[in-house]
């Protein structure tokens, strides 16, 4: 892993040195799967049409951990990229360190305050300054299913945990991998987001993961959530370890597996494979979380290049927030717009549902930040939760021990 990161960092610095030009934007991101690359092209093309060049700085790895490591090395070397994909508390951290440019001029002239949902502004504005441009809203409590596999096995879209486990049992008997999963900590915690919400409910999800209340982190419901994780573990194939998320999605796309629990970036993979929701695949909320939206929003942080926001940075920020881009990009990416005033007309059935769910959840107080994707806690606490969830998933300890470890790990990290 360390070797891989070092190679990545070296490559990052080399690529920049060779290709970056003053008038280009250099963009560091982790959108490397087929569906993600297709969405990124929408942004590249948009900028190109304005005469702005693009220097690509991809660093693979969902959740952005590797990308953040490369970023730290670049900033330490005094060579920050122009714009960097960022999530939640990472954005706040970079802003507090004084690394981000102030986008207030462009934000004011386009009235971002009025159209960007409040939940996102918490992570895009620090001390009254806009420091990043919100691209989308993703959410993690989704399940993706192969429709032909469901039909062939007489399975309806499950709406309770019991129906879900009954469906998993049927698939096992039929010799189909019930759940496609990639064994990487961020993927395990992405699954845990929905599982924990389904057992704890929204108030205790907040108490546990946002307020870090030890009685909930170490309580019986949390143990029950870990028990559900163990059931999920018993329904993945033998080769899950280390598998990339998009390869797990491919298993559902080609009928090798029935379900994947993953954020709605998975939809980008289905679309990229020309699959149609309702016909080839189904999207539904993890049973027990139909009213909740566990969100993460991709944003582009603009790194201070020595004082003022550059013309290219302002153009990039403005392009990202434009309603037409928000529609075109998010239709392809699987996410929903980061503005409240974009029509759902161009979106497919899953996208329309995503937009409606987000609006309803924001209104009813059911919108919560994703633990897995840095919208519940700063990196130290997030990583502590990663460690415990992954160790339990890999059978290092049982659920009763997991809750004790969770309380300990969080209290050390916070
Ligand atoms: C990002 C998504 C991305 C996913 C997998 C998440 O952290 O928010 O945009 O598609 O990781 O790479």
Image: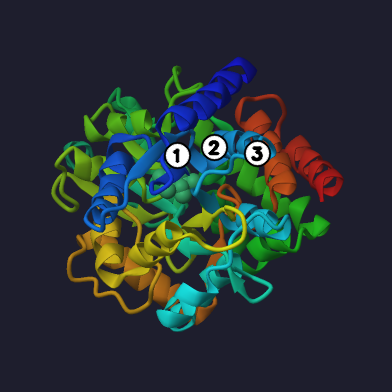
- Distance from Cα at disc 3 to Cα at disc 1: 15 Å
Q: Earlier in the sequence, mark 3 or mark 2?
A: 2
The residue that label 3 is drawn on is 72
Mark 1 lies on a secondary structure that is loop
The residue that label 2 is drawn on is 67
Q: Does the residue labelled 3 lie within 8 Å of ligand 1?
A: no
Q: Quadrant of ligand 1?
A: top left
Q: Earlier in the sequence, mark 1 or mark 2?
A: 1
Q: Quadrant of the N terminus?
A: top right
- Distance from Cα at disc 3 to Cα at disc 2: 9 Å
Residue 102 badge: none
Mark 3 lies on a secondary structure that is helix
255 to 296, vertically: above or below: above
Residue 30 badge: 1
Residue 140 screen position, x and y as percent: 46, 52
Contact between marks 1 and 2 (CB within 8 A): the answer is yes
């Amino acid at each position: 892993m360390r070797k891989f990161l070092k190679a990545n960092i070296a490559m990052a610095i080399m690529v920049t040195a060779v290709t970056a030009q003053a008038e280009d934007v250099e963009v560091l991101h982790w959108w490397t799967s087929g569906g993600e690359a297709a969405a990124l092209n929408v942004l590249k093309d948009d900028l190109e049409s304005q005469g702005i060049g693009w220097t690509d700085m991809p660093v693979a790895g969902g959740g952005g951990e590797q990308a953040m490591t490369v970023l730290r090395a670049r900033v330490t070397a005094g060579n920050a990229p122009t714009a960097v994909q960022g999530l939640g508390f990472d954005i706040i951290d970079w802003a507090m360190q004084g690394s981000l440019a102030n986008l207030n001029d462009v934000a004011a002239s386009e009235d971002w305050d009025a159209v960007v949902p409040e939940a996102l502004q918490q992570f895009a504005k620090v001390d009254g300054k806009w420091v990043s441009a919100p691209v989308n809203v993703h959410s993690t409590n989704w399940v993706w299913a192969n429709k032909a596999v469901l039909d062939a096995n007489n399975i309806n879209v499950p709406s309770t945990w019991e129906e879900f486990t009954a469906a998993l049992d049927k698939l096992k008997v039929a010799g189909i991998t019930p759940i496609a999963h990639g064994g990487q900590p961020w993927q395990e915690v992405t699954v845990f987001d929905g599982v924990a919400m389904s057992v704890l409910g929204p108030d205790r999800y907040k108490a546990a993961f946002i307020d870090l209340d030890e009685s909930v982190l170490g309580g019986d419901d949390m143990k029950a959530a870990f028990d559900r994780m163990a059931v999920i573990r018993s329904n993945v194939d033998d080769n899950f370890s280390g598998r990339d998320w998009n390869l797990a999605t491919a298993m559902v796309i080609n009928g090798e597996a029935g379900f994947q629990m993953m954020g709605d970036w998975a939809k980008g993979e289905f679309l990229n494979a020309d699959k149609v929701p309702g016909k080839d695949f189904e999207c539904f909320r993890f049973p027990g979380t139909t009213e909740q939206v566990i969100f993460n929003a991709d944003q582009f942080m603009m790194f201070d290049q020595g004082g003022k926001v550059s013309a290219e940075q302002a153009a990039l920020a403005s392009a990202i927030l434009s309603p037409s881009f928000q529609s075109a990009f998010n239709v392809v990416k699987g996410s929903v717009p980061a503005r409240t005033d974009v029509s759902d007309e161009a979106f497919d059935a899953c996208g329309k549902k995503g937009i409606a769910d987000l609006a309803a959840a924001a209104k009813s107080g059911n919108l919560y930040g994703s633990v897995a994707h840095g919208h519940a806690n700063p990196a130290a606490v997030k990583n502590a939760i990663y460690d415990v969830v992954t160790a339990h998933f890999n059978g290092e300890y049982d659920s009763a021990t997991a809750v004790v470890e969770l309380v300990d790990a969080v209290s050390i990290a916070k």
